[in-house]
Image (cartoon, grey):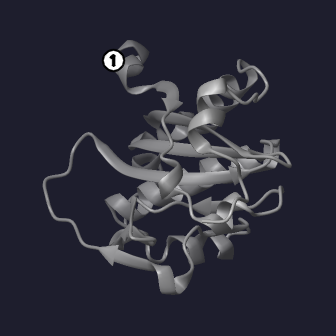
Amino acid sequence: MADANSSQKNDTSWDVPRADIPVRVLTAEAGGRLFLLPDKTIDGVGIYRDDVAGLVKTLRHNGIDIDFASAREDRRYLSEYGAAGEIVGIIALAVVGNYTGDLIKSIARAAWQRARTAIGHGSSPEEVESAIVTVRIAEISSTDQEAIIRGLEVTSPVADVERILRSAIADRRPTEPSPEASDAAGPEGAPE
């Protein structure tokens, strides 16, 4: 049975659009806080799917230090209708600083809650655990000169998210600025 799901379990790098990361996230102090990223940004306004409106509040209630990446006045919600696909939910998060064991657990809990919201609050824990989700994580490391953003994307059943994240992070090299990223990003903190 594991072979049937092998195509559903993967981790890859994610090309994080710098323009979609609000300044408040790029300038946040390193720590254990998560930020819920918008699905897209238009003219500085973060656009979120309407089914995540209560997600941050629910996660906070469950002890996770999370906030919207976009300030209240800079976010809008979009309703989307359509046939459900194999992936029941997508969640994009930003991590400022290094991953810790607690932070990985928080990401896995956020994925669980996102799946539960997507398939319905009346769903059983087993249904939620087997739901396929995509978790996109933007890891932001700051130096005095720049913010380095590295993305990781995991698509798997909810039950496997934490294990796959731990494995993917353990296999990585330390974050180093790439020449292309440094040249394309320009100096951080420069006046616009």
Residue type for callout 1: Ala
In percent of the image, x 74 and y 69: which residue is there?
Answer: 63
- Side of 174 where 158 appears, left or right: left
Of residues 145 and 159, which is closer to you in this image?
Answer: 145
Compared to residue 80, the image places residue 137 above or below, namely above
Snapshot quadrant of residue 121: bottom left
Residue visible at 74% across and 62% down in the picture: 27
Residue under numbered circle 1: 4
Residue for point 73% across, 67% down? 65
Residue 33, image x, y percentages = 75, 61
Q: Is residue 51 left or right of residue 106?
A: left
For the C terminus, which image quadrant? bottom right
Q: x and y percent of residue 130 in the render?
A: 42, 40
Q: Nearer the viewer, residue 92 or 41?
A: 41
Which of the 4 image quarters holds residue 163?
Answer: top right
**Residue 65 relative to residue 23: left or right:** right
